[in-house]
């Protein structure tokens, strides 16, 4: 019997965790952390709803923490198999997991010091030691090639765009000769985005698990360079500070690359860019290491022409230098994590700058329900950070064109060439209204039957062999 269980990203955007089981053998596609409301975050502390020691392997679609952030807990519960990921995902994953562990350790220490915890002692969800044990299991795997996991599973990666190294995963399952196949979209990126590859054409499969982050939204049609240039013009004119919450890997390099391009082309005056992250240098080096995974022709750029650095780009590694940025006067850009404003150094910048009318806060990524990022995006004028009230007087704007996620129309484009109707499409990785809208869109456009699974639901998958068997019985 072949089953698929949805232990995350079902009815919500985060916590991706799909368990595929053939008889008594199982593998996980993604093993991510829940983010957002307290209720969701509490799930991260519970035991996995399956035995971690019996999972043969994890296949990681990409390095975002909502896709890999639960691997350290899985290891702590007894998982010791391989974690298959592309080489950039493995490298960025190492940065993400160590950075998350470090920030959670710092946050727990801060809460204990300031007595901000409702528990006896605040603890990190996982420590740097846990993260290292998880990182040791990573097995770099190139896209396009089949890899077997026992005799029950084999998989291959297909480029998904989204961020450096991100993939969709095609899995073939074999139950003693009875076979089926399933494609997990992963997070699908947009087309023609600076520094990110386009998603590759997906293969035809029997089942599809499709994300629906922007299941009811279409991104603005403006050129992202034009949008960014007009914001920067304004910042330069008013000598204000542009604050951008973004993770150190991916969006940060994209923004720096775009600002450098606009400056080089003379479309904006030079402006200082401050990257406030201990991980920024490592992150930038990963882009240099994997030219095949992004769209910048490094050979066309001279050694002096630093596409992710330059005289106006300043990196702040230690805490003191990060805090010193509070005295910074504009015009300037500050980029700091976390992207959804759920922790990390962005918090002290927000406490300091949200009440300031001379600050522009640009939201470039998806903000999950229940996060501080979503509250600010929704226009709340008073928010609480570390239990302190903070007034929002800064100008808040969305740069939707820089989103890392395809909207529903772009997902439709991604699936355009797929002619064979999947037996069933599972819509995941979206808030309920977004998933419903995506299901309705695929039904209308392609006539595909869609199911929106609920958390921890298990579904039995048919095999081609099973149908053949039935026919032979009839014959
Ligand atoms: Zn992602």
Image (cartoon, rainbow, N blue to C red):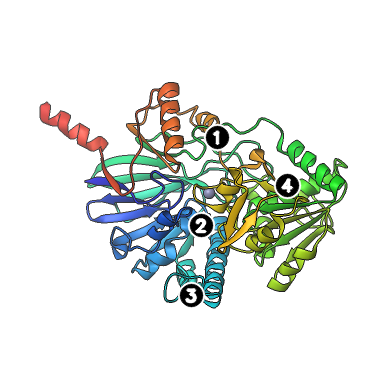
Q: Earlier in the sequence, mark 4 or mark 1?
A: 4
* Residue closest to the eye, 375 or 149: 375
Using the rendered image of the protein, determine whether residue 31 is visible from the camera's viewpoint.
Answer: no
Residue behind mark 2: 65
Residue behind mark 3: 129
Alpha-carbon span between mark 3 and mark 1: 38 Å
Task: Classify 124 as above or below 56.
Answer: below
Secondary element type, mark 2: helix
Alpha-carbon span between mark 2 and mark 3: 17 Å
Image spot of residue 426 (x, y percent): 37, 37
Secondary element type, mark 4: loop
* Label 2 CA crowd tier, 10 Å (few <14, some 14–19, many 20+): many
Image spot of residue 269 (x, y percent): 88, 47
Image spot of residue 470 (x, y percent): 16, 32
Residue behind mark 4: 297
Residue behind mark 1: 407
Nearer to us of marks 2 and 4 is 2
- Image quarter of the C terminus: top left
Alpha-carbon span between mark 4 and mark 1: 27 Å
Secondary element type, mark 1: loop
Alpha-carbon span between mark 2 and mark 1: 21 Å
The answer to whether the residue labelled 2 contacts the one labelled 1, judged by CB atoms less than 8 Å apart, is no
* Left or right position of 55 against 325: left
Task: Classify 51 as above or below 256.
Answer: below
* Residue closest to the eye, 167 or 404: 404
């Amino acid at each position: 019997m072949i089953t698929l269980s949805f232990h995350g990203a079902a009815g919500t955007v985060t916590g991706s965790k799909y368990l595929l089981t053939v008889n008594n053998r199982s593998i996980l596609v993604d093993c991510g952390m829940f983010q957002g409301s307290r209720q969701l975050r509490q799930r991260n502390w519970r035991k996995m709803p399956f035995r971690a020691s019996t999972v043969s392997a994890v296949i990681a679609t990409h390095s975002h923490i909502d896709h890999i952030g639960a691997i350290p807990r899985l290891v702590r519960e007894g998982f010791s198999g391989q974690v298959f990921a592309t080489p950039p995902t493995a490298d960025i994953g190492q940065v993400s997991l160590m950075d998350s562990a470090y920030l959670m350790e710092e946050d727990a220490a801060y809460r204990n010091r300031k007595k901000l915890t409702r528990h006896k002692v605040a603890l990190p969800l996982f420590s740097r030691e846990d993260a290292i044990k998880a990182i040791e299991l990573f097995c770099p795997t190139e896209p396009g090639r089949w890899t077997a996991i026992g005799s029950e599973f084999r998989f291959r990666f297909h480029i998904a765009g989204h961020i450096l190294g991100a993939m969709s995963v095609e899995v073939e399952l074999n139950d003693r000769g009875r076979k089926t196949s399933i494609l997990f979209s992963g997070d699908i990126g947009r087309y023609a985005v600076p520094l990110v590859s386009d998603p590759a054409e997906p293969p035809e499969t029997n089942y599809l698990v499709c994300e629906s982050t922007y299941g009811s939204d279409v991104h603005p049609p403006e050129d992202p360079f034009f949008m960014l240039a007009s914001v920067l013009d304004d910042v330069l004119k008013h000598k204000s500070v542009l604050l951008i919450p973004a993770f150190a890997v991916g969006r940060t390099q994209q923004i720096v690359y775009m600002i450098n391009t606009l400056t080089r082309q003379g479309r904006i005056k030079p402006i200082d860019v401050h990257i406030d992250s201990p991980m920024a240098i490592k992150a930038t080096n990963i882009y240099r290491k994997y030219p095949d995974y992004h769209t910048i022709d490094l050979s066309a750029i001279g050694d002096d022409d630093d596409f992710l650095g330059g005289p106006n780009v300043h990196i702040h590694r230690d805490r003191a230098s990060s805090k010193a940025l509070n005295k910074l006067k504009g015009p300037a850009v500050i980029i700091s994590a976390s992207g959804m404003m759920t922790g990390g150094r962005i918090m002290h910048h927000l406490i300091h700058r949200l009440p300031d009318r001379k600050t522009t806060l640009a939201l470039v990524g998806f903000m999950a329900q229940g996060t501080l990022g979503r509250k600010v995006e929704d226009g709340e004028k008073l928010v609480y950070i570390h239990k302190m009230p903070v007034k929002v007087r800064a100008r808040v704007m969305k740069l939707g064109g820089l989103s890392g996620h395809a909207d529903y129309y772009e997902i439709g484009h991604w699936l355009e060439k797929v002619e064979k109707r999947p037996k069933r499409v599972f819509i995941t990785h979206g808030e309920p209204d977004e998933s419903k809208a995506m299901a309705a869109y695929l039904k209308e456009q392609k006539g595909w039957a869609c199911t929106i699974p609920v958390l921890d639901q298990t579904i039995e998958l048919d095999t081609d062999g099973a149908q053949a068997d039935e026919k032979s019985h009839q014959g």
